[in-house]
Amino acid sequence: MSTAGRSVRAKVWDRVAASDPGLLRLTAGLRTVCAISLALVVLGPLRVDVTHLVAGAMAAMVATFAIREKQPARQAVTLALGLPVALASVSLGALLNTRVVAGDLFFVALIFCAVYGRRFGDRGTALGLIGFQVYFISLFVRATAGGLPGLYGAIAVAFACSGTARFVLVRQTPAGILDRLRRAFRARLAQLVAAQTELLDAGPEEVEKVLDDVRTGTARLHEAALMIQGRLEDGTSDEAMAGLVQRRIADAEIAAERLGLLLLTARAARRADTLTLHLPGAPVPSPVREPMRGEATDALRRDLRALRMLVLRPVGEDTGTGPAQVRNRLLGYRDGENLPPASPAVQDVSRGIGEAARAVLGLRTALEGPQDESDDSPAAARSREELDAEDAAITGGADGQRGEEQPTGLRRPTTRAAVQVSVGSALAIVGGELLSSQRWYWAVLTCWIVFINTASTGEILVKGYRRVLGTVLGVVAGLGLAGLVGHHTWTAFGLVLLLIFAMFYTAPLSYTLMSFFVTAMLGLLYTLLHTYSTAVLVLRVEETVLGAACGVLAAAVVLPVHTDRRTNELLVTTLDHLADVTRAAVDQLSGGAPTDLLEKARDLDQALADLRASTQPLTHPITPLRSRRATARYVVALLETCAYHGRSLAATAELLPSHPTIAADPRLRGAGRRIVHNIETIAAHVADRRTPSEVETGRSIAALLEPGSYRTPRYGRVTDRVLRHLQRLDEAVTGLARPLDVPVQRPKN
């Protein structure tokens, strides 16, 4: 293949990788479609009836999507255990089909056990899901005791085909997933650099739109970093390698975000606030200068494009004098070599490009092994020596997880959810049978689904709303597709496969879209079973609305976890992790004993991701409380700002044991003490508003060391950079006090 052809293919691949990190959505859709197709190919020549074809196809789908474990060996064990669970479930469904009361009571008990099983991890969740869904299949195809032998065969074939699809046709390994996630991170990093480059040429009226693109790119890069962190343990050869990759990913993310801030500062008349990159709709620092022009700007644009080229350069094409010269030039900016004659703000951007180039070099070395050093300049050689020293210092050791008190009894989340779903399902059974004695189970299915991956009444309400909206739209599509297909069985199965792929591909992006594809698919399945009618699809909407209402009612009345309580708990957890990271980083920067700072930073990122997800009911467009929506977004943006500075402090502190030019500064301990105190004060106030303590204010953090170091930062002195992060962190933490109604101590004269 020609070089141009490889380049085009690489660009297309990078776009796909960036939109679907790790190709997890694509793989989920293909694997499920392959499993169902295999089941149909095996069952078709056996001349089984359409009912068994539908049961086999649905069982193959369930056996494929229910298993979420990361290691193939554990997946195989769970799949093997799932078959007897499925056979037992379909047997009880068929035997209790004519015994209404006994069948309903068993269904509620099965639902309780399936949800309670989530406390036993991925395997318990998978087996519970298989048991519930296969029982639902028995109701859907109206299984009878006489038809059990045929159903046993169809389900056994389905599980065998699911295993073939999983372990042979669409095989995934933890190392392979991590490699694809790394490519996605690289592609998203390049996209972010491209968006940042546009800041140079954007006019005053275009800056807002370009800044939104930079915000989106920053958030997408952070999402990819979190996904990589979640796969490191299983996808790397040992703990040391996992620690090394985690460190290099963190370096690249921090360098890219810092570069965006420096570019924004160069466009404005004053230093940009980190909050601007995290708060949607935040105003651009004013006044905004006209688009940057001149030789220095042309050089800056050239260097940003060169940085993007280094990020995207495929493995094996990083040799030769051309890429080496580009890399050497960018790395030289770190030490102030050949900086363009321009304002200090523009020169700071060049230094930031140099730091980003170093982060890219470290990331490539960690992921791809030793690089060609024959054409290195002295600046590049120094960067490699620093990276080698850091690599040698990373041992991958961890301090161990702190033991946290686990709730028991009804306070345990799985127990509470099991009780809530059981009550909601009982209500859905009663109401569903009043609507239809034949298809009441749709209400139960909806009630079950709205509780999956939700933890508060607000989350359940939003998910129920999305389920109903997707179902209504899917009914309209189902009517059209059923009319087009008619009685063409294999055409209908082909469309079903297409809709199933779309369902799994869009599931992580939009629950509404997923519900749409599910309902459209069901219209085709009803056509195959010769039970299709407009009344059936309208009933589907009615049962969905009823199931969602029963779920919301059960969540609001039975052991409720209100959205405010849930978000407050997660907010306290996030603040605790932020205080932990800040305290440990400042202590190590002051000369204290080394700790696993990046692991603490990872815990902070995960806690913040959980908090961000829990605030969705407060920030959803349908919420009537506009002021609360604005407050929730502002608080989350401030915490993202704090997390960025916390990660930066942790990354800098990790350099101390190995970096030849960095020394501890004991004076920093005093500078960080007030920040930690304020974080703990805010956390205590959120947990208990009667807390009497106040947020402290006073002299700026920068003023605690020699004057002038903050106003005129010198990249050769790490203390200056640390002070900037501490100063911004102090400002962001103090800023949290106002929206959270925490009292602030008046500064003393």
Image (cartoon, grey):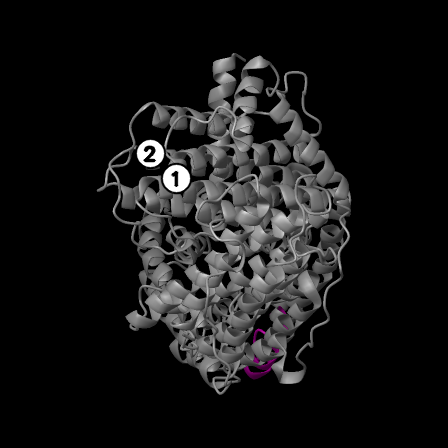
Give the percent coordinates (x, y) of residue 275: 40, 55
Which residues fall within the magenta stretch? 94-107
> How far, Cα to Cα, is label 1 from label 2?
8 Å
Residue for point 51% across, 70% down = 571
Residue 193, label in figure:
none
- Frontmost residue, 709 versus 295: 709
Identify whether 541 is placed above or below 189: below
Identify whether 285 is placed above or below 318: below
In the displayed orientation, state which residue is furthest to the left: 205
In the displayed orientation, state which residue is furthest to the top: 2
Label 1 sits on residue: 263
Residue 287 belongs to magenta span: no
- Name the quarter where the C terminus is drawn: bottom left
Residue for point 46% across, 40% down = 259
Q: Secondary structure at mark 1?
A: helix
Magenta span: predominant SS is helix
Disc 1 vs disc 2: Cβ atoms closer than 8 Å? Answer: yes
Q: Which kind of residue does numbered mark 2 sit on?
A: Leu
Give the percent coordinates (x, y) of residue 625: 30, 73
* Residue 515 visible in the shown view: yes
Sooner in the amino-acid sequence: mark 1 or mark 2: 2
- Frontmost residue, 381 versus 392: 381
- Frontmost residue, 686 versus 161: 686
Identify whether 305 is placed above or below 207: above
Q: Which kind of residue does numbered mark 1 sit on?
A: Leu
Give the percent coordinates (x, y) of residue 266: 36, 39
Give the percent coordinates (x, y) of residue 419: 58, 81
Residue 98 belongs to magenta span: yes
Residue for point 63% across, 57% down = 585
Q: Badge 2: few (under 14), some or many (20 or more) residues near its Cα, within 10 Å?
A: many
- Name the quarter where the N terminus is drawn: top right
Label 2 sits on residue: 200
